[in-house]
Amino acid sequence: MNSWDWSAVADFMPRFWDGLLTTLRILVLGSVLSFALGLVWALCYRVKTRFVRWPVNFITEFIRNTPLLVQLFFLFFVLPEWGIQFSALTTGTVAIGVHYSTYTAQVYRAGIDAVPVGQWEAATALSLPRSRTWTAVILPQAIRRVLPALGNYVIAMLKDTPLVVAISVLDLLGQARLQGGMTFQYNEALTVVGVAFIVIAYPASLLVRALERRLVR
Amino acid sequence: MTSGLWQHWVLPGIWITIQLTIYSAALAVVVAFGIGMARSHRSRVVRFLAGFYTEIFRGTSSLVLMFWIFFVLPNLFGWALVPMWAAVLALGLSYGAYGAEIVRGGLNAVAPAQREAGVALNFTPWQRMRLILLPQAIPEMMPPFSNLLIELLKGTALVSLLGVGDVSFAAYLVRLATQESSKIYSVVLVIYFVIAFVLTRGMRALERKTRANLGLTATGGAR
């Protein structure tokens, strides 16, 4: 039984910054991917033909109801079998982005549904083409409404980034495990990482709540 | 070879996944109702502590929490947990924090007049909670709880990283033995999907039941 050692915290710091950078990189790129792909799914939900709507519905339901970890392994081990080679970092980012796109899709769907019917009718009355209706009338209003919900999913994504340790990406948790494996400073490294998550996530959630209040008004 | 792996790892793995889901869901429900009700307590201290708990456990990643409970707890305090129970504790405590928000939201959604009526009838706070607020709030909580249960099911996959032999861990072993990655991981994804489907259906039935107890139909509104 070994107790707490502050010098171990200092020892861990260089690794900590490396890990933080990797975690934030996965988070930013994963968020961008999930925002973009989610919008694509959400638009597909509204396509008239069932041959688009049904498969997209099924695929997103499937991804949403199965664990990210298993999807991560799936991509990591199966893509190379199909001759597609990604780095572990890219695989992790793609897995998180795709997984969360199925959540953002639901958010966009609700946002689009919440745009008043009158807005559609006004666009028709102005005889705007379909693409203009979407880009100039519907989406700006829908996306404004869903920003807080998207923010919440970014926070959720932050808390899922440590899963990439499973494919040996050295994010925050990965660096902590490495430190623990080499110096047995598990206590300090893991605690620092745990605290780091709270320190990032708590202000972020306050920010999202403030945004929620502003936009709801 | 493959069939032996199936019997010795995948099938017991499914059972362990189901057990993990049940145990952590049970813990999460206790935490969720405890903390969620505490957030509307008269005492400021109780409210603060409950809020603090929620922020801490919602703030950190459940995988980091699991590692912390598994690696740090034994070192710092000298009590080690079997991986399975470390996992149940981590999952139950963190998903319980999410559940607490659902409970709080559900209780807040009950019309204030109902609470006042309870006060007028001279009910104690606990009687108001048990006889008036909870019966009306619980049906409201069921759909978000259903989502949370699916999240928890997916969260159980994390335990494979601690070496608990759940179905994800089984997939890992089968892949190592057979190198048939696409096959085993597709099968495992389908297994999770099927369990999630069953859970969703079960929760919907439960929702209908709790609503029926209040004389409400599934779509809401009085019958």
Image (spheres, rainbow, N blue to C red):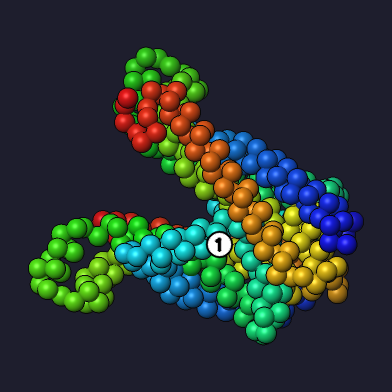
Q: Amino acid at mark 1?
A: Ile
Which residue is more in the foreground, B29 or A175? B29
Instruction: Report the residue at 73% width, 64% height from top.
Output: B184
Could you say which quadrant of the image residue B112 lies in? Answer: top left
Q: Residue at x 62, y 63 (%)?
A: A68
Q: Residues within 10 Å of mark 1 (few under 14, many from 20)?
A: some
Quadrant containing the N terminus of chain B is bottom right
- Image coordinates for residue B201, horizontal then vertical, percent: 53, 41
All told, the count of numbered labels is 1
Question: Residue at coordinates 33% horizontally, 60% vertically from top-left?
Answer: A111
Residue at image coords 57%, 70%: A96
Relative to B110, is B39 on the left or the right? right
* Chain of the residue that carries numbered disc 1 in the rendered image: A
Residue A44 appears at what percent x and percent y?
38, 67
Identify residue for label 1.
Answer: A63
Q: Could one spot residue A93 in this view of the protein?
A: yes
Q: Quadrant of residue A62?
A: bottom right
Judge by depth and name the residue closer to the eye, B148 or A172.
Answer: B148
State the image coordinates of residue B58 (x, y, percent, origin top left): 57, 54
In the rendered image, residue A60, in percent from the top left (x then y), is placed at: 50, 62
